[in-house]
């Protein structure tokens, strides 16, 4: 994770804000990580059938994930934790440890088995399932970090390629964001010029499955396979939570339905196929000027 603030008036104020911004990442990790059996979300996943009072942060993350699930007709589904764990996505990237939740999950569980009660701030899981908020919480952490930096004009937050930028970069009137070539990730495929938006990219090259499963870290809930038709997908949106989650949803929907979905949600997106053919939403080209 990198935070850049361009020429802040006070170095001390900048350092304090950056520290507060970073602390959101550990707070979210503590509450929402599937790779820590003590996190709030994993303790919730271990309690099936009874209402569990959760923090505001976790409640908001799950509420948002469920609304994207509904908007995408279930292409996006935050109850895929069991499938992801079975595919070998169970390594804590900080400690390197493999996490085996030991939790049983029902193959038929979907987002419809997650019941929210906003009055009591409770969540009830109707079937055995493991919540995975990986498509929501990185974006959420970036947005909360950005709130801590709002007194600065020009800054960028980069969390492993998911980005929020405000104002402009060092020598431009906006920020230049390089998108990777999904088949040669050390090369830039193209450069966007953006300001006051988030740019989030999902790529099939990021994390490959293990345990004998083919595919990568995005799973189609209906087929339980990785969508084959997209190599990378970039969304530009006002917030990182929206860009991150809508991107994952569109990835599952595939090139045609995915782009229509992004257009309906009022965000811009670029899809690169495995043979490096690009498709994009109608307004995307404005980010090239
Ligand atoms: P990203 O490529 O950063 O958007 O990450 C996608 C993440 O979302 C994965 O690492 C999983 O944690 C999670 N995920 C995978 N498939 C789905 C899906 N169909 N719906 C919701 N979340 C998913
Ligand atoms: Mg995403």
Image: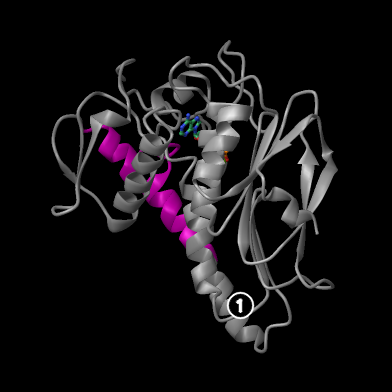
Residue 66: give x, y in percent of width and height: 34, 40
Q: In the displayed structure, would residue 8 be above or below residue 119?
A: below
Quarter assignment of residue 16? bottom right
Question: Helix or strand or loop: what does disc 1 sit on?
Answer: helix
Q: Which class describes the residues within 10 Å of circle 1: few (<14), some (14-19), or many (20+)?
A: few
Q: Is residue 147 left or right of residue 194?
A: left
* Residue toward you, 63 or 6: 63
Q: Which residue is disc 1 drawn over?
A: 15
Q: Residue at x 79, y 54 (%)?
A: 288
Looking at the picture, does residue 186 appear above or below residue 6? above
* Residue at position x 47%, y 63% in the image: 144
Q: Position of residue 274 (x, y in %)?
A: 75, 24
In the image, 100 versus 25, the foreground residue is 25
Report the predominant secondary structure element of the magenta stretch: helix
Magenta span has 57? Answer: no
**Residue 35 covered by magenta stretch:** yes
Residue at 42 percent across and 26 percent down: it is: 100
Give the vertical position of 61 relative to 36 (above or below). Answer: below
- The x, y position of residue 199, in whole percent, is 64, 52
Residue 92 visible in the snapshot: no
Q: Tell which of 102 and 86 is nearer to you.
A: 86
Report the residue at 46% width, 18% height from top: 86
Quadrant of image for the N terminus: bottom right
Q: Quadrant of residue 128?
A: top left
Can residue 138 be seen at all in this image of the molecule? yes
Left or right relative to 152: residue 190: right
* Residue range corresponding to the magenta coloring: 22-47
Quadrant for the C terminus in the image: bottom right
**Image coords of residue 203 (percent x, y):** 67, 34
């Amino acid at each position: 994770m990198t935070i850049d603030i361009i020429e802040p008036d006070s170095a001390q104020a900048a350092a304090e804000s950056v520290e507060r911004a970073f602390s959101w990442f550990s707070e979210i990790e503590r509450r929402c990580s599937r790779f820590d059996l003590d996190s709030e979300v994993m303790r919730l996943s271990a309690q099936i059938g009874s209402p569990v009072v959760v923090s505001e942060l976790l409640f908001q993350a799950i509420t948002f994930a469920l609304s994207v699930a509904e908007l995408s007709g279930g292409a996006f589904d935050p109850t895929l934790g069991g499938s992801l764990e079975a595919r070998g996505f169970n390594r804590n990237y900080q400690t390197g440890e493999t996490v085996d939740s030991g939790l049983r999950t029902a193959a038929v569980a979907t987002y419809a088995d997650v019941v929210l009660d906003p009055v009591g701030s409770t969540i009830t899981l109707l079937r055995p399932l493991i919540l995975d908020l990986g498509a929501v919480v990185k974006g959420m952490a970036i947005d909360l970090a950005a709130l801590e930096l709002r007194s600065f004009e020009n800054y960028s937050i980069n969390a492993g390629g998911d980005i929020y930028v405000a104002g402009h970069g060092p020598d431009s009137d906006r920020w230049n964001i390089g998108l990777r070539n999904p088949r040669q990730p050390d090369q830039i495929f193209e450069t966007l010029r953006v300001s006051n938006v988030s740019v989030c990219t999902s790529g099939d090259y990021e994390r490959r499955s293990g345990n004998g499963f083919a595919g990568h870290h995005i799973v189609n809930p209906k087929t339980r396979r990785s969508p084959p038709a997209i190599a990378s997908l970039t969304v530009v949106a006002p917030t990182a939570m929206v860009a991150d989650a809508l991107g994952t949803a569109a990835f599952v929907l595939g090139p045609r339905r995915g782009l229509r979905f992004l257009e309906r949600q009022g965000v811009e997106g670029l899809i690169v196929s495995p043979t490096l053919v690009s498709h994009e939403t109608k307004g995307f080209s404005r980010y090239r000027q």
